[in-house]
Image: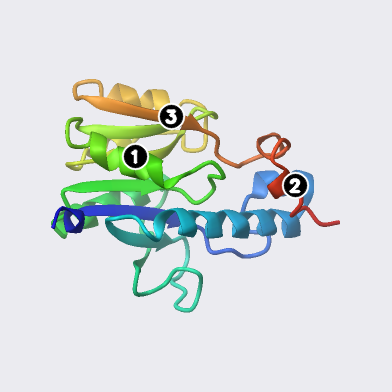
Amino acid sequence: MAKEKNLIIIFTRNPELGKVKTRLAKTIGDKSALNIYTFLLNHTKNVTQNLDCNKAVYYSIKIRQNDIWDNTIYSKHVQQGKDLGERMHNAFEDAFLKGYKKVVIVGSDLFDLKPKHINEAFRYLDKSDAVIGSAKDGGYYLLGMKTLNSQVFKNKAWGTSTVLQDTLQDLKQIDVHLLEELNDIDIYDDIKNIEELKQLIKE
């Protein structure tokens, strides 16, 4: 079956007080930042759990067995590498070594992420070499590939506004499809117009 050759990789941080959404926490405090990140983790689970593909969760620190990620739906791994680029590279490399033909990675801090974005990514990989979902902050929220392109994971200032442009420069020799732009949740400006998230801010 085709879906067995498709893999969605979800990168998450272990939801611990003071360790997640640190830039957001500077404005709203660690507890509220954790509340919002926990909400976004659940949202990412709801978006991905019924997709017609295989699913893998990569934890930042250690695997949690009895958490929101159902072991019968998601395979569980720990991110390996010194920076985000190396960790993503190793996850993609592992997926291709296992025989997957289309691999898509997403983060877990996207309030606007919907199943259609991931389904569209897999669909466009039928005719494009790579797919990128651009983020409003100059990065990207989704990356999909059919073969491992190691260059996209090297020499990037991760978390800055140049990541998307630098990545597209690396991929200029191949056909890349750009998905709808979405907004990562990183700072207070990203949530100030989202009532559902603002309600999670506690004194």
Residue 190: where, in percent of width, then height? Answer: 65, 36
Mark 2 to mark 1 CA distance (whole Å): 29 Å
Specify the quadrant that holds the N terminus.
bottom left
Label at residue 180: 3
Mark 2 to mark 3 CA distance (whole Å): 24 Å
- The image quadrant that residue 41 belongs to is bottom right
Q: Which residue is mark 1?
A: 143
Please tell me whether mark 3 sits on a helix, a strand or a loop. Answer: strand
Pointer 2 or 1: first along the chain:
1
Do we see residue 167 in this rendering? no
Which residue is rendered at x = 20% and y = 30% of the image? 128
Which residue is rendered at x = 68% and y = 59% of the image? 35
**Amino acid, disc 1:** Leu
**Amino acid, disc 3:** Glu
Label at residue 24: none
Which residue is rendered at x = 38% and y = 30% of the image? 179
Q: What crowding class fits label 2: few (fewer than 14 Cα within 10 Å), some (14-19), or many (20 or more)?
A: some
Please tell me whether mark 2 sits on a helix, a strand or a loop. Answer: helix
Residue 192: where, in percent of width, then height? Answer: 73, 37
**Amino acid, disc 2:** Lys
Residue 188: where, in percent of width, then height? Answer: 71, 39
